[in-house]
Image (spheres, rainbow, N blue to C red):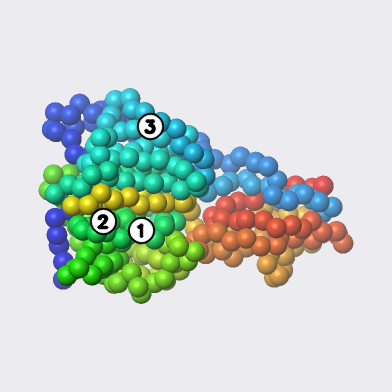
């Protein structure tokens, strides 16, 4: 049996009268956010990826990507809640049990920093969470900097995928991948933990499904690429830097979709901060190219894919997420070619020259 322990969630807890007051407002707000997400993910032709003699390739439907490459402004309150908005990242909100005095978020130098300013004797956390819920079965990606050491206490880098209905139900059910850093007998110890949490805000519990030392997987360029996939019911898979670190289809989680992602920090007895570079939510495998004429073919990273009924699906696993390479459209003795960056789950459209 996996270990069960009291949740160390940093998610802010509301008093009963506050929860009742907010329930109706937030239910409407969630519907508006989901409607906005649908509009956001609707088909829209963007700037072409490639143009040339054989025609153009443009992005028709893009995944949800946030690169923290713009410096953030001063956080300000989200009306009707205790959350903060972080301009220009208005599709996210900040909150947590550390509160606005101890918790902070900011984007500088291409990274989002999430932190708690002062040590607390019990676990406190702070997070940035999406306001654009995604369906069950999507792949949630986070690129995080290898977290700092601690002189004392416990610091955690946490990437979580949680039900988006917490404010209506009080349930904080979620799956998570965390990197826990502490000292044992004076020696630094960092451990990966994979699991899920369940229950109401004031008595939630977490189940640790897998634990292994940080040293088992080396960071790449100082970063960890963490991927979470779940149906919210029985199945959960997680990867770190391409290694599948957990997989099961026999769980009993009852995490109601749609889901929000949490980029989070936790601390106990130490001030602590972690950094994230990028987030992505991807619908599935492959990159689809539509509207290709008869006889056309796509060459991607040296391999040719002929069009069938006007369509080519380029291989790109959703747990990998992104790839760069040379893309070429060949048609009627002409070619359009160039370097592109593709995301799993996106749809491209061919346009004639």
Please tell me how crowded label 2 is: few (under 14), some (14-19), or many (20+) other residues with Cα within 10 Å.
many
Q: What's the mark number on residue 155?
A: 2
Q: Assess whether mark 2 and mark 3 are in contact (beta carbons under 8 angstroms).
A: no
Residue 96 horizontal/vertical position (percent): 26, 41
State the separation of the CA atoms marked 3 and 1: 24 Å
Q: Assess whether mark 1 and mark 3 are in contact (beta carbons under 8 angstroms).
A: no
- Which image quadrant: the N terminus? bottom left
Q: Assess whether mark 2 and mark 1 are in contact (beta carbons under 8 angstroms).
A: yes
Apparent side of residue 253 relative to residue 224 in the rendered image (left or right): left
Q: Is residue 100 above or below residue 340?
A: above
Residue 94 horizontal/vertical position (percent): 33, 38
Give the residue number, with chain letter if any, for mark 1: 147
Residue at disc 3, secondary structure? loop
State the separation of the CA atoms marked 3 and 2: 24 Å
User: Which residue corresponds to the image point at 25% horizontal and 49% vertical from the top-left?
Assistant: 271
Q: In this view, does 247 lie above or below 342?
A: below
Residue at disc 2, secondary structure? strand
User: Which residue corresponds to the image point at 36% horizontal and 41% vertical from the top-left?
Assistant: 105
Residue at disc 1, secondary structure? loop
Q: From this viewpoint, is residue 259 visible?
A: no
User: Which residue corresponds to the image point at 46% horizontal and 51% vertical from the top-left?
Assistant: 277
For the residue pair 256 and 180, the one nearer the viewer reads as 180
Q: Of label 3 and label 1, which has the lower sequence position?
A: 3
Q: In this view, does 221 lie above or below 11?
A: below
For the residue pair 117 and 124, the one nearer the viewer reads as 117
Give the residue number, with chain letter if any, for mark 3: 75
Apparent side of residue 343 relative to residue 38 in the rendered image (left or right): right
């Amino acid at each position: 049996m996996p270990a069960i322990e009291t949740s160390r969630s940093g998610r802010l807890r509301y008093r009963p009268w506050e929860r009742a007051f907010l329930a109706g407002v937030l239910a409407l707000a969630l519907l508006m956010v989901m409607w906005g997400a649908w509009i956001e993910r609707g088909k829209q032709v963007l700037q072409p990826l490639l143009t040339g003699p054989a025609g153009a390739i443009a992005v028709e439907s893009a995944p949800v990507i946030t690169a923290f490459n713009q410096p953030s402004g001063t956080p300000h309150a989200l009306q009707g809640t205790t959350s903060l908005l972080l301009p220009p990242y208005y599709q996210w909100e900040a909150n947590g049990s550390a509160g606005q005095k101890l918790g902070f978020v900011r984007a500088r130098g291409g990274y989002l920093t999430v932190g708690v300013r002062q040590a607390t004797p019990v676990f406190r956390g702070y997070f940035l969470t999406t306001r654009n819920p995604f369906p069950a079965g999507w792949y949630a990606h986070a690129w995080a900097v290898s977290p700092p050491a601690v002189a004392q206490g416990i610091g955690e880098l946490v990437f979580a995928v949680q039900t988006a209905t917490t404010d209506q139900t009080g349930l904080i059910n979620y799956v998570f991948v965390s990197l826990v850093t502490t000292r044992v007998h004076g020696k630094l110890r960092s451990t990966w933990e994979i699991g899920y949490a369940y229950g109401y805000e004031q008595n939630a519990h977490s189940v640790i499904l897998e634990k292994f030392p940080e040293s088992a997987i080396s960071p790449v360029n100082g970063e960890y690429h963490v991927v979470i996939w779940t149906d919210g019911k029985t199945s959960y898979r997680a990867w770190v830097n391409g290694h599948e670190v957990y997989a099961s289809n026999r769980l009993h989680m009852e995490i109601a979709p749609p889901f929000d992602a949490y980029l989070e920090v936790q601390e106990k007895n130490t001030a602590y901060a972690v950094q994230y570079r990028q987030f992505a939510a991807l619908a599935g495998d492959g990159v689809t190219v539509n509207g290709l004429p008869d006889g056309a073919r796509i060459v991607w990273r040296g391999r040719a894919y002929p069009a069938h009924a006007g369509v080519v699906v380029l291989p790109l696993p959703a747990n990998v997420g992104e790839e760069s390479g040379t893309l070429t459209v060949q048609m009627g003795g002409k070619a359009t070619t160039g370097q592109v960056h593709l995301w799993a789950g996106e749809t491209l459209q061919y346009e004639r020259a």
